[in-house]
């Protein structure tokens, strides 16, 4: 499958000159692989808020994996939406324990460790600023 280079012309005037990325996806995918389709090139090109909204919508559509929840948690971390990030990180940790994927579990623990360090540093900085 590939993009339709004329898709934007259905919605925008010709002088707008907006063209989709030239992108293709194999017809067949590996077993136990989940494809995440990001609708809207702004998300694919770095609109993190749009990407997070798409991932959250995909999450509501059916069962997800620890990798999916970890990806969503990482995107929320990048946006500094830490309360939401912790919810998805906890879900990723729970799913990972059930799935038994050591690499994903290690990534989750790494992000938890990073958060602990950041919270300790922020707490120490607040204490210093009160002195």
Image (cartoon, rainbow, N blue to C red):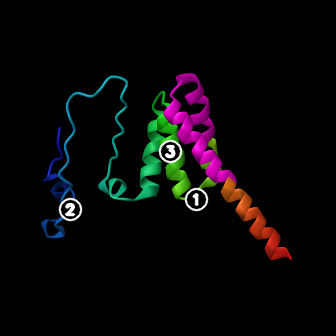
**C-alpha separation, residue under disc 2 versus residue under disc 3:** 31 Å
The residue identified by callout 1 is 80
The percent position of residue 3, horizontal first and vertical second, equals 18, 46
- Residues under numbered marks 3 and 1 in contact, where contact means CB atoms less than 8 Å apart: no
The residue identified by callout 3 is 72
The percent position of residue 43, horizontal first and vertical second, equals 37, 54
The percent position of residue 4, horizontal first and vertical second, equals 15, 48
Q: Residue at x 63, y 42 (%)?
A: 87
Magenta residues (range): 89-116
The percent position of residue 118, horizontal first and vertical second, equals 66, 58
Q: In front: mark 1 or mark 2?
A: 1
Within 10 Å of disc 1 (Cα), the crowding (few <14, some 14-19, many 20+) is few
**C-alpha separation, residue under disc 1 versus residue under disc 2:** 34 Å
User: Mostly what secondary structure, the magenta segment?
Assistant: helix
Question: Which disc number belongs to residue 12?
Answer: 2
The quarter of the rendered structure image containing the C terminus is: bottom right
* Label 1 secondary element: loop
């Amino acid at each position: 499958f590939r993009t339709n280079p004329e898709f934007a012309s259905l919605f925008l005037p010709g002088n707008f000159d907006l063209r989709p990325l030239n992108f293709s996806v194999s017809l067949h995918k590996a077993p136990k692989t989940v494809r995440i389709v990001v609708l809207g090139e702004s998300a694919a090109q770095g609109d993190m808020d749009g990407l997070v909204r798409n991932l959250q919508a995909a999450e509501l559509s059916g069962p997800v994996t620890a990798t999916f929840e970890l990806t969503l948690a990482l995107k929320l971390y990048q946006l500094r939406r830490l309360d939401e990030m912790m919810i998805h990180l906890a879900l990723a940790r729970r799913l990972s324990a059930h799935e038994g994927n050591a690499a994903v579990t290690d990534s989750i623990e790494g992000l938890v460790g990073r958060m602990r360090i950041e919270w300790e540093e922020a707490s120490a900085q607040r204490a210093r600023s009160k002195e």
